[in-house]
Image: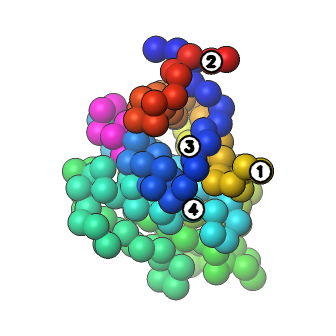
Amino acid sequence: MAAAPLELFLPDESATRRAGFCLGQALVTLGLRVLTVTLRGELGAGKTTFCQGVGQALGVPTGEVRSPTFSLAHEHQGVIPFSHLDLYRLERDPYAEFLEAGLEESLAGVCLVEWAQRLPDSFWPLTRLDLTLTPASSGGRALRGRGLAPQAQKVWALLTHQYLAWSGESLSQP
């Protein structure tokens, strides 16, 4: 397997959902039951769409994965159970609000965290996979991934290789 690229180009919403699907497939392939995935990006960047793709891969019925902006968290029972957090509304004291809501328990399993930038990187487990969605100059969006721990690096590598195979792009680095 060629080295994983640092960034993927996602031309549209369907591709963003597919990248999420590839993350879900990677979790199943590796048999992971614990991984925090931080998702960063501005409003409309595609974070929830990405999470919907993960849910689809894990067997959660279409339409069940929605942004938990107002409830802060949704739990999903798929092939691998996962938590979906949205920290957008944590503004006053994000750390205290996170703990008051009991959200730290979600980090004990697979957990997708939208608006992870509300808390410092030092808050999140070192084993996490950091994903950032940003608008691309040519339209669409770029998905950048980073994993410090070997487990997170394996997930990113599988996600990127599955996505590139689906999109028909080359699996080798330029």
> Which of the labelled discs sits on residue 46, or is there none?
4
**Residue at the spot of label 2:** 173
Q: CA distance from mark 3 to mark 2?
A: 24 Å
What crowding class fits label 2: few (fewer than 14 Cα within 10 Å), some (14-19), or many (20 or more)? few
- Front label number (4 vs 3): 4
Residue 121 in view (yes/no): no
Residue type at tag 2? Gln
Identify whether 67 is placed above or below 92.
above
Q: Amino acid at mark 1?
A: Ser
Q: Give the Cα separation between the discs numbered 3 and 1.
A: 28 Å
Residue extending furthest toward the bottom = 70
User: Which tag is nearer the camera, tag 2 or tag 1?
Assistant: 1
Residue 117 visible in image: yes
Marks 2/1 in contact by CB < 8 Å: the verdict is no
Per the image, the residue denoted by label 3 is: 128
Magenta span covers which residues? 24-30
Answer few, some or many: residues within 10 Å of disc 3's Cα (few below 14, many 20 plus, some between 14 and 19). Answer: many
Residue 41 falls inside the magenta stretch: no
The residue shown at (54%, 55%) is: 12
The CA distance from mark 2 to mark 1 is 21 Å
Measure how far apart labels 4 and 1 are at the Cα level: 16 Å
State the residue at coordinates (38%, 48%). Answer: 21
First along the sequence among labels 3 and 1:
3
Q: Which residue does the numbered mark 1 point to in the structure image?
A: 137
Q: Tag 4 or tag 2, which sits nearer the N-term?
A: 4
In terms of sequence position, does the residue under pointer 4 or pointer 1 come before the other?
Answer: 4
In three-dimensional space, the C-alpha distance between marks 4 and 3, rounded to whole angstroms, equals 19 Å
Structural crowding at the residue carrying mark 1, measured as other residues with C-alpha within 10 Å and reported as few (<14), some (14–19) or many (≥20): few
Residue 61 x/y as whole percent: 24, 66
Question: In the picture, which quadrant includes the C terminus?
Answer: top right
> Label 4 sits on what residue type?
Gly
Q: Secondary structure at mark 1?
A: loop
